[in-house]
Image (cartoon, rainbow, N blue to C red):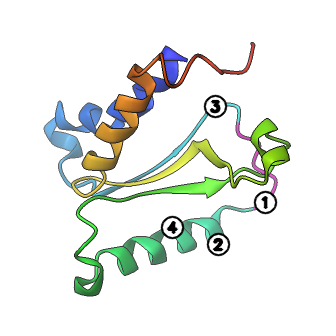
Amino acid sequence: MMSKRYKTELLDLLDGDKKFNSITHVLYMDVDIVIAEPLKSFVGYVQGMSRMLSQPSYSQYQSWMLMFEEQGAAPERRFGNTVYHGGVLGLHRKRSRGCLAEWQKLFDDRERFPDRDQKA
């Protein structure tokens, strides 16, 4: 699961090159995501959510990132839990860093969160 930790450093990759300075949002998808429909409506949804979360009325949320509900048969569903898919992320260049840092702490806490990654 340590490879999943790299997702928490996605925005850091942009910081290393000035040609990326104008990028404010990132839509990340794992390489194994199967896209069965045009992405236009999904990208529009992500843009709308980002605009909404950037409004002053949401200023109490110092950091945010978008994750989406798992569509597959995740084992946690048998307990009635909502499961969020970590393979599709909507990130804001500045406002998602706090969430990514907290997510990184979860990956690093092997005692509370043992390796549960899918087998290749």
Residue picked out by circle 1: 37
In three-dimensional space, the C-alpha distance between marks 2 and 3, rounded to whole angstroms, equals: 20 Å
Q: Residue at x 77, y 42 (%)?
A: 34
Q: Amino acid at mark 1?
A: Glu
Q: Is residue 24 left or right of residue 2?
A: left
Position above or below: 55 against 11: below
Crowd class of label 2 (few under 14; some 14 to 19; many from 20; radius 10 Å): few
Asked if the magenta segment contains residue 66, the reply would be: no
Crowd class of label 1 (few under 14; some 14 to 19; many from 20; radius 10 Å): few
Q: Amino acid at mark 4?
A: Val
Q: Residue 95 placed where, x, y %? A: 25, 58
In three-dimensional space, the C-alpha distance between marks 1 and 4, rounded to whole angstroms, equals: 16 Å
Sequence-first tag of 1 and 4:
1
Q: Quadrant of residue 53?
A: bottom left
Let me know if residue 49 appears in the view: yes
Q: Are marks 2 and 1 in contact (CB under 8 Å)?
A: yes
Determine the main secondary structure of the stretch shown in magenta: loop
In the structure shown, which secondary structural element does the residue marked by tag 3 occupy?
Answer: loop
Quadrant containing the N terminus in the rendered view: top right
Frontmost residue, 10 versus 38: 10
Frontmost residue, 49 versus 47: 49
In the structure shown, which secondary structural element does the residue marked by tag 1 occupy?
Answer: loop
Q: Is residue 75 left or right of residue 27?
A: right
Sequence-first tag of 4 and 3:
3
Q: Amino acid at mark 3?
A: Val
In the structure shown, which secondary structural element does the residue marked by tag 4 occupy?
Answer: helix
Q: Residue 72 placed where, x, y %? A: 82, 45
Residue picked out by circle 2: 41
Quadrant containing the C terminus in the rendered view: top right
Crowd class of label 3 (few under 14; some 14 to 19; many from 20; radius 10 Å): few
Q: Amino acid at mark 2?
A: Ser
* Label ID, residue 46: 4
